Amino acid sequence: MVSSRPSDTKIKKGGVKKPLPGGPPPSSPVVRLAIPNKGRIAAPIMELVEKSGLHLPETGGERRLITRTLDPHVEILFARPADIPEYVATGAADLGITGRDMVIERGSDVKDLLDLQSGRAKIVLAVREDSEIHSVRDLAGAKVATEFPAITQNFFKKQGVSVNVVLVGGACEATPYLGIADAIVDLSSSGTTLKTNRLRVLADVLETSTHLIANRESLRTKKEKIDEILLALESVVRARGQCYLMMNVKRTALEAVTKVLPGLSGPTVMDVASKEDLVAVHAVVNEERVYTLINALRRAGAKDILVMSIQRMIR
């Protein structure tokens, strides 16, 4: 089921929801999850949602603002990452996935449920490579361009330095060379863009990553469904970078193999119906270790080794 309406509710002042004609009542059990419609974190978040089991039905390539998932009690709201914290705070969405930087910038009253450990980046203070500015205090009275005015003001307030914040909507890196600002406060994931634009990092302002946030009232009224969604997303995050090893081992070599084999809680050992007196050994290991681990297991006596990816892992 796909809804083409911009929203089933409208927000009145004070965050009170008033149902639109034809929309579900306020007591509707449907949980609305807001995710980015574009930007650097949009694609990874969409992949995370799909892996968690909240599949979106095929819509012929057309994306609606609000789309139901295959779970009839969960729907997706596509929104600008910067708007998601307020959508969640006011109750337009029950849950949201966006950058921690967006939540802090908006100062939204939401509950942080889970660091999804993706979209890691830093907000940094940077100046021109040839600038004579070498410390934060050198910027007293200077102009600082940014898309994050609240974060920027708070940073300089803690430093005891007064600056003039220049709000820009994009291309922040160009402002020091256009004479618009003496420094910038901007998001940086790899540092490549800063180097390309001949900028030098003066200080780290804030570390950020993608987080799952919740409306505080929804946590009370829709707790069971929200807990279910949280567990689903958490299981995908936990499975990242892990793989599942299965192998056959002669019982006489079992001790040697288990010494080689790391695991979350130790390997699982099961008898095999075989005349060779074999046991099956299963373990979850970090995929970065698999390359060297396979040879070590072979030398220790393991055979018939299978390496499988893990989509979700629940403890």
Image: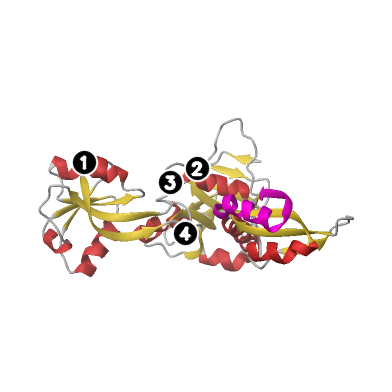
User: Which residue is under mark 1?
Assistant: 174
Determine the main secondary structure of the stretch shown in magenta: helix
Name the residue type under label 2.
Answer: Ala
Label 3 vs label 2, nearer the camera: 2
Badge 3 marks a residue whose secondary structure is loop
Mark 1–mark 4 distance (CA, rounded to whole Å): 36 Å
In the image, taking residue 123 as reference, residue 210 lies left or right, namely right
Q: Which residues lie in the magenta part?
A: 288-308
Mark 2 or mark 4: whose residue is earlier in sequence: 2
* Residue designated by label 2: 43
Camera-side mark, 1 or 3:
1
Q: Secondary structure at mark 4?
A: helix
Q: Is residue 151 left or right of residue 129?
A: right
Using the image, tell me which numbered label, if any, was put on residue 80.
3
**Residue displayed at 12% across by 47% down:** 130
Expressed as whole percent of the image width and height from the top left, the position of residue 79 reads 47, 46
Q: Nearer the viewer, residue 116 or 143?
A: 116
User: Tag 2 or tag 3, which sits nearer the N-term?
Assistant: 2
SS under mark 1: helix
